[in-house]
Amino acid sequence: MKAKTSKKVLMSGNEAMAEAAIKANCFFYAGYPITPQNEIPSYMAKRMHDEGRVFIQAESEIAAINMVFGASACGVRVLTSSSSPGVSLKQEGISYMAGAELPAVIINVMRGGPGLGNIASAQSDYFQSTRGGGHGDYFTPCFAPYSPEEAARLVMLGFDLADFYRTPVLVLADAIIGQMMEAVEFPKESGFTKKLPPKTWALTGKSGRTANIVKSFFLKEGGLEVHNEHLRKKWQKIKENEQRSDTHKTNDAKYLIIAYGSEARIALEAIDILRAKKVKVGLFRPISLWPYPEKNLKTISKKIRKVFVVEQSLGQMVEDVHLSIPEKEIHFLGKTGGGIPKAHEIAKFIEKHAK
Amino acid sequence: MPNKTRPASLKNISTHYCSGCGHGILHRLVAEVIDEMKLSEKTIGVAPVGCAVVAYDYWDFDVCEAAHGRALAVATGIKRCRPQNVVFTYQGDGDLVSIGLAETFHTANRGENLTCIFINNACYGMTGGQMAPTTLVGQPTATTPWGRNPKSGEGWPVKLSEILATLSGVAFAVRSTISSPREVIKTREYIKKAFSNQIENKGFSIIEVLSPCPTIWQKSPINAMKWIDEEMVKTFPLGVIKDK
Ligand SMILES: Cc1ncc(C[n+]2csc(CCOP(=O)(O)OP(=O)(O)O)c2C)c(N)n1
């Protein structure tokens, strides 16, 4: 089913991501209820049924990710979604999928932590999402939307990228993006232009070929090293080709805000406040959190005097900023546990340090 | 009837199993049934984490790995996407009854149309013989050195097949062993029946097989078989528990 260019539809970010999965021909969804992503399984329950595809309310996030593992092993497109505590439970499964090179899209609509935390917006799963998250030597491409429409596009991109590289892909939204309603226009295509390889490795029964095995286990001496070196080359390729970012008013900027997801939206307002006061400030917005868009950040920040990293966390992405542009003066503003750095707070913080 | 020659679905290589281990017999029975029913091009197996973790090295049909305990969740994903295939899991007692109990219970309760082959050796073989949920009362293991004692909080042997038989989604639940040629032939018939059930869309089937682990039990292969007949069956009685 090819998606037609649709007119704008009013939708929450969660619903937009779910519909994007339908449009991207996702055949299998399994998930377990958790706020603030419950609109995704509800939407999928109905739409997957309408499309004659598979929806399962699993008994847990652990079961859901392992169902998704099995479905992906058959070569169909698969999705699971959850929020922070549930995504922690999925980590063993995500590690297995990275090892077995199984494509999947995994949506995390972040809430506050640690522990049961709360159900307010947070960006505190950045480390988990960009450093593998589970056990072992691996990475997962991770994309962070800043609007429902972009969330939809990144889900579509995620499916293509997952199939191309044979890897699980995370879409890391936060509660604000998941819950906010906005006009969404679904794109015709994901924007990923490389040709997707046929899934000759899929388990379909060995009719007309030798048996296929899907596994992440390499017991023989040296076997895992060879496999992980193969993975290393893949991560390297993704690092080179899949960095994505956006900028706003950076042409004449002396000061740069770096923020992603819902915090990037708030930063836009801070820029308006500061620009009205003739402070030349712009925004760098990472869209891929892994790979971190260090190439663009290096270029953009050349003429920048000071950098301001703003997050809904105690400071996680700021480490990647330090790694990308170590020579710059970097200031961090973060709030945690449902606290959100507001536009006027960001503006005040920058005014204080910009002098 | 059982073949005298090696079934085509079993590769011609020697296994890593200890002498007297039940996995060799059971791998072969599965392969024989698949060949007899002409299912080798339609079957997708799911291997456990346990001694049979590399079952895919020995079988010659499509096989999927699963994390420890999650084989039935993986199998659910496979079967829902490919209802035209025959899908089975092959799992030990630690995998199926301990760490994976939630997946086991709910897969059975959904009545997933697939087959679960449950190898009950009353211990964790792979990790060095610790207590399993199926360890007999009084049976010494690496973590119950004085024998499993329910009174000191170690619990009682779990009769999984009886528990699953209470669920409406379960079509067939049976317990057998491989302690004698007669029992081996019976087990083979049960596996065949479970695959037939699946082809007829009857729902979930479980075949629990009491299987020897001479190394961990510290018995000769022959005495291990005897222990099944004389001790294990007292806790785990053989026979058809449910046939819907
Ligand atoms: C999450 C996780 N926990 C623990 C282990 C270690 N482990 C491997 S096999 C096993 C027990 C296997 O016992 P059983 O399922 O009875 O199979 P057997 O080895 O007896 O055939 C354990 C605990 C693991 N691989 N993964």
Image: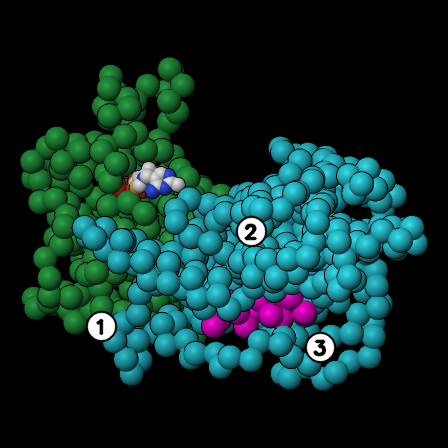
Chain colours: A cyan, B green
Q: Is residue B95 above or below residue B181?
A: above
Question: Does residue A259 show up?
Answer: no
The image shows residue A158 at horizontal and vertical percentages of 58, 66
**Subunit bearing disc 1:** B
What x and y, as percent, mark residue A243?
A: 56, 64
Ligand 1 within 8 Å, label 1 CB: no
Residue nearer the viewer, B72 or A263: A263
- Furthest-right residue in view? A276
Q: Nearer the viewer, mark 2 or mark 1?
A: 2
Could you tell me which residue is drawn at 23 percent across and 51 percent down? A219
Give how far apart the Cα atoms at labels 3 and 2 are: 32 Å
Cα–Cα gap, marks 1 and 3: 51 Å
Seen at 64% across and 66% down, the residue is A154
Structural crowding at the residue carrying mark 2, measured as other residues with C-alpha within 10 Å and reported as few (<14), some (14–19) or many (≥20): some
**In this figure, which residue is indicated by the disc labeled 3?**
A187
The answer to whether tags 3 and 2 share a subunit is yes
Residue stretch rendered in magenta on the structure: A153-164
Pointer 3 local density, CA inside 10 Å: few below 14, some 14–19, many at least 20? some
**Residue A75 in the figure: left or right of residue A289:** left
